[in-house]
Each structure stands twice: as structure tokens, then as C-alpha cells.
């Protein structure tokens, strides 16, 4: 039997209403819904006023499989995410290892990962069930954290960005930037970002970094409020590795944040290494809208006066 993973923003009534609609669509087509046990618990703890009538009964019925995250990824062929980009990032943590493609239905604000709008939900679900879509691969960043004696303390990954920042907002941290095993610059700063092409329209964009088209095989090193003459963003290729060392002279700790969700304390003498991962995430696309058009739409960029080449189809 076919199974689809459903992942909704449990704190938004609109997302739970959309979840009810998707459950009905899947049921009509004989497709079982799968929900992680963590998501199930979150929904059950939602305020009663935000829960659509009958939702809990459906989740408790035999129509829905409630399983742990590892089992969910092994069972399903595709994930439908109802929320904004943050909800999609949470869902990708569940399915990345199993390389399950995910489609995002936008209920947020400026979303570059979500494609469909909730107003088109019925059409979206029908096309997903019919296999009428394309897969877009998105690069991720592998992260290694090493201790003062070069020992590996932790490994992780990020789709958008890995942000090493000061733990105390009143202080600076002092870092050394290393590229491909060679020191490039040292300075005091608020922090340093390692950003993928996907993250270049998120925190990296806000920090003054360039926007990278999703298919470009590169990542960014973006200093945050650096006290240095040379503090420009750096664009690195797949063969490169970047490292950020929190120098031993620091009196204060830093904190590494991955995709705005997972945090790790970084103490003086530790280093954060990042490079493009061989494992990407897979996004389901229903249209082939050029990325430039998505930029214009999401950021409401003015294009008044554009004519284009005469005779070109647009």
C-alpha cells in the first residue's frame, strides 16, 4: 500500500485544517497517511480551539500510521509539509537519511522552500498522488566540531546555514577563518555563517551575503559584524572546506546554531568545520518557475520598465 508522510505546523489552526483536508484526499485515493509520534503528541497538546473537529479521531483511527521518525522515513514514498520553511526544515530532519522527497505547502510568509499555496491544496495533492511532479536536489552542509586536541566531538548537517555566534550578546567572539587548511583572516565579530545556496536567501541574505542560485555547487562563509577591514563573504566550491576556530584567547563561549533549530555550545579552542555534503535533500516541484521569478515574487522586487528581448517567450 502507498504511504505519504504528513507533517504540519502543529501550532497553527490553518495548518491543522489543511491536514484534515489532506487526510481526506489520501483516504479517497486509498493512500495511507503516516505521522511521526512526535508530531502526534504535539497535535494532541494543541489548544482545543485550534483543533478541527474530528482530527484526533482520524489520527487515532486505523487510517493513519503513527510511528517513530526512523520508521516513518522507511515507510513512505513522499512527504507533504503544511507550514512555512521552518516546518519544512523540521520535516527534512526526519526524511533526509532515507532520501524521501518533500513537497511544501506554504502557510508562512516569505518561503523559498515551500512551493504550493494552501488555496491550491486539492490540486496539489492530486498531482502528488498522480506522480505529476519533478524532483529538485538541494545541497546541504556537513558539519564537524572538533575539540582543542583535534578530537571529533560532534557531527551534524544543515540545509540553510550553520551559524557560530557569541553566546553573550554584550560581548564579541574572536575567530580565525581557515579555508582548505590555510588561515585566511582573524577578527572579532558577532559571529560567522556557513551558508548553502538554499540558505543564501535566508540568514545569509540578511547578513549581506550574495544570493546563490540553487543549482550552483557552492557555499558561503559570511562574517557577522566583523571588526576587520577584510570581512567580505567568501564563495567556496565543492572541493573546499571552511573552518572557524574560536581562539583560546576568548573569555566567552560561542553557540553554533544549525538551521535555526539545533544548538551546540562552542568553547574557546574548539573549531567548526563545514563542507558541501555528498547527500542532498530532495524537494518536490510542481512547476518549473525560474528562480529569478521566485525572487521577484517572494521579495516583491520592482521590475517596472523591463522589456526583455523582442520575440522571446516569457
Image (cartoon, rainbow, N blue to C red):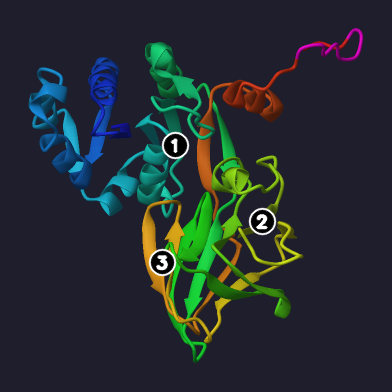
- Disc 2 element: strand
Residue 26 got which mark?
none
Q: Earlier in the sequence, mark 2 or mark 1?
A: 1
Residue 167 got which mark?
3
Query: Which image quadrant: the C terminus?
Result: top right
Q: In the rendered picture of this protein, how many numbered marks are placed on residues?
A: 3
Within 10 Å of the Cα at label 3, are there few (<14), some (14-19), or many (20+) other Cα atoms?
Answer: some
In the rendered structure, which segment of residues is drawn in magenta? 304-311
Q: Earlier in the sequence, mark 3 or mark 2?
A: 3
Where is residue 243 drawn, in percent x and y?
A: 61, 73
| Disc 2 from disc 1: Cα separation | 20 Å
Q: Quadrant of residue 122?
A: top left
Q: Which residue is mark 2?
A: 220
Q: Is residue 176 above or below residue 93?
A: below
Q: Earlier in the sequence, mark 3 or mark 1?
A: 1
Q: Is residue 142 magenta?
A: no
Q: Is residue 291 above or below residue 206?
A: above
Within 10 Å of the Cα at label 2, are there few (<14), some (14-19), or many (20+) other Cα atoms?
Answer: many
Would you say the residues marked 3 and 2 are in contact, meaning their CB atoms lie under 8 Å apart?
no
Give 221 or 22, whichever is nearer the viewer: 221
Query: Residue 178, can we see it?
Result: no
Q: Nearer the viewer, mark 3 or mark 1?
A: 3
Q: Which residue is mark 1?
A: 85
Amino acid at each position: 500500500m502507498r504511504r505519504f508522510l504528513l507533517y504540519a505546523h502543529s501550532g497553527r489552526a490553518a495548518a491543522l485544517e489543511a491536514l484534515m483536508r489532506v487526510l481526506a484526499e489520501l483516504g479517497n485515493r486509498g493512500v495511507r497517511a503516516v505521522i511521526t509520534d512526535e508530531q502526534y503528541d504535539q497535535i494532541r497538546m494543541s489548544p482545543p480551539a485550534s483543533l478541527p473537529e474530528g482530527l484526533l479521531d482520524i489520527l487515532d483511527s486505523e487510517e493513519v500510521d503513527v510511528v517513530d521518525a526512523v520508521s516513518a522515513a522507511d515507510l513512505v514514498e513522499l512527504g507533504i509539509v503544511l507550514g512555512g520553511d521552518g516546518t519544512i526544515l523540521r520535516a527534512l530532519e526526519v526524511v533526509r537519511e532515507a532520501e524521501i522527497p518533500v513537497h511544501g505547502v506554504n502557510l508562512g510568509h516569505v518561503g523559498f522552500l515551500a512551493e504550493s499555496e494552501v488555496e491550491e491544496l486539492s490540486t496539489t495533492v492530486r498531482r502528488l498522488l498522480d506522480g505529476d511532479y519533478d524532483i529538485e536536489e538541494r545541497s546541504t552542509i556537513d558539519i564537524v566540531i572538533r575539540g582543542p586536541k583535534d578530537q571529533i566531538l560532534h557531527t551534524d548537517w544543515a540545509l540553510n546555514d550553520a551559524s557560530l555566534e557569541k553566546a553573550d550578546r554584550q560581548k564579541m567572539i574572536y575567530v580565525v577563518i581557515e579555508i582548505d587548511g590555510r588561515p585566511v583572516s582573524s577578527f572579532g565579530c558577532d559571529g560567522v555563517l556557513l551558508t548553502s545556496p538554499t540558505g543564501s536567501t535566508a540568514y545569509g541574505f540578511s547578513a549581506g551575503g550574495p544570493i546563490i542560485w540553487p543549482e550552483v555547487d557552492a557555499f558561503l562563509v559570511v562574517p557577522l559584524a566583523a571588526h576587520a577591514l577584510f570581512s567580505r563573504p567568501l564563495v567556496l566550491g565543492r572541493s573546499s572546506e571552511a573552518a572557524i576556530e574560536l581562539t583560546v584567547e576568548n573569555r566567552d563561549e560561542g553557540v553554533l546554531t544549525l538551521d535555526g533549530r539545533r544548538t551546540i555550545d562552542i568553547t574557546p579552542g574548539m573549531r567548526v568545520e563545514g563542507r558541501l555534503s555528498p547527500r542532498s535533500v530532495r524537494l518536490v516541484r510542481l512547476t518549473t518557475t525560474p528562480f529569478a521569478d521566485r525572487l521577484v515574487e517572494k521579495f516583491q522586487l520592482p521590475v517596472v520598465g523591463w522589456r526583455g528581448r523582442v520575440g522571446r517567450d516569457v
